[in-house]
């Protein structure tokens, strides 16, 4: 019977390999990681950067020289970038194309959004209340950003914000910035309706209320949208765009509402040089 696991006598067993201790393994050099970089993409990006630095355009020869490319390689990449819309060629000069400009616009929009979000977070922390940022765009109310926290939660949107502008401070503030025709158009699409016992009762009363609001005064509502919650909104206008920054507080803190709204207004005033530029976020 054959013996299982027995090696022939003339076949030397391989030497036993000693395992490294954890300390020795730690001292061993790490294996290099293979990283694949696509050179043609790198060269194309360098060309885009070179074109972006030339407001009045540049010829292929100049771009190739600046980037350190052979002229045939530069021509090939420039033609590809032009075909894809990242460059355009006029009278032998290359300029940034629509695709590159869209990328630039997206980056600028992200920067504006980040700036607004940072501002809202600062105001939330300094005021001790959730902060909202909204605009009136193409006939609709859009809440673009909210900064809240577990200790200062935002109001739950239990009734569609777009359909209940008459009941919350954000909507009242935004509609107060519109002309009479635009207000009536909005109310024709979203009629006044009772949301809570404190909501304005009809469209005529609501329009009278809007007419009585001061142009840059905070708009206050108490439990008109949500029972147990009071809100204040501060108008913010840039050109034809109506915007508002708002806060909300529990109704038992209603005495804080107007001072907090004044504080918010002062905070916004310190950023007037930058915030209105960010309405389009």
Image (cartoon, helix red, strand yellow):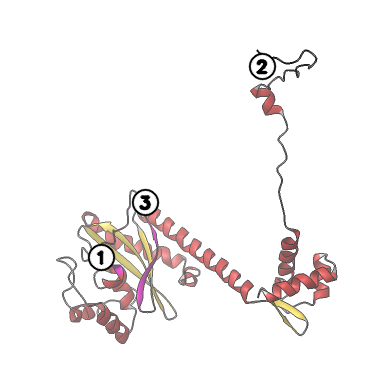
Q: Which is nearer the eye, 84 or 193? A: 84
Q: Residue furthest front?
A: 1
Name the residue located 73 percent from the left edge and 61 percent from the top edge.
42
Q: Residues within 10 Å of mark 1 (few under 14, many from 20)?
A: few
- The reply to whether callout 2 and callout 3 are in contact (CB within 8 Å) is no
Task: Tell me which segment is drawn in magenta.
Answer: 139-161
Residue 148, compared with residue 26, is above or below; it is below
Residue that numbered label 1 is attached to:
159
- Look at mark 3 in the image and give the residue it sits on: 149
Q: Is residue 147 magenta?
A: yes
Label 3's element? Answer: loop
Give how far across and how far down residue 134 sits, in percent. Answer: 38, 68
x and y percentages locating residue 269 in the rendered image: 43, 67
> Which x, y percent locates residue 186?
29, 80
Name which of mark 1 and mark 2 comes first in the sequence: 2
The local crowd at label 3, few if under 14, some if 14 to 19, many if 20 or more residues have their Cα within 10 Å, is some
Magenta stretch secondary structure, dominant:
loop
Whether residues under marks 1 and 2 lie with C-beta atoms below 8 angstroms apart, the answer is no
Quadrant in the picture for residue 146: bottom left
Q: Residue at x 74, y 77 (%)?
A: 94
In the rendered structure, the answer to whether residue 70 lies left or right of residue 233 reads right
Looking at the image, residue 106 sits to the left or right of residue 28; the answer is: left
Residue 61 visible somewhere in the drawing: yes
Find the residue positioned furthest to the bottom: 181
Gap between marks 2 and 3 measured at Cα: 68 Å
């Amino acid at each position: 019977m054959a013996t299982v696991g027995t090696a022939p006598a003339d076949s030397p067993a391989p030497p036993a390999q000693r395992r490294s201790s954890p300390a020795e393994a730690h001292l061993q050099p790490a294996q290099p990681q293979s990283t694949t970089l696509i050179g043609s993409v790198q060269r194309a990006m360098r060309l885009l950067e070179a074109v972006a630095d030339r407001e009045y355009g540049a010829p292929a020869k100049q771009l190739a020289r600046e980037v350190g490319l052979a002229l045939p390689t530069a021509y090939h990449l420039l033609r590809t970038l032009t075909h894809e819309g990242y460059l355009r060629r006029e009278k032998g000069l290359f300029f940034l194309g629509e695709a590159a400009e869209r990328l630039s616009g997206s980056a600028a929009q992200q920067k504006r959004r980040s700036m607004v979000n940072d501002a809202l977070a600062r105001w939330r922390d300094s005021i001790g209340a959730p902060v909202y940022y909204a605009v009136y765009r193409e006939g609709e109310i859009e809440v673009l950003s909210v900064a809240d926290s577990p200790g200062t939660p935002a109001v739950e949107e239990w009734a569609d914000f777009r359909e209940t502008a008459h009941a919350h401070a954000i909507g009242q503030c935004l509609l107060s910035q519109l002309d009479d025709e635009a207000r009536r158009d909005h109310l024709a699409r979203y009629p006044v309706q009772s949301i809570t016992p404190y909501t304005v009762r009809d469209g005529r009363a609501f329009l009278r209320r809007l007419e009585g609001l001061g142009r840059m005064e905070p708009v206050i509502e108490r439990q008109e949208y949500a029972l147990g919650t009071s809100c204040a909104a501060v108008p913010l206008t840039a050109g034809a765009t109506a915007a508002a920054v708002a806060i909300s507080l529990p109704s038992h803190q209603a005495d804080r509402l107007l001072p907090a709204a004044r504080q918010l207004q002062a905070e916004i005033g310190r950023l007037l040089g930058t915030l209105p530029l960010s309405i389009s976020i």
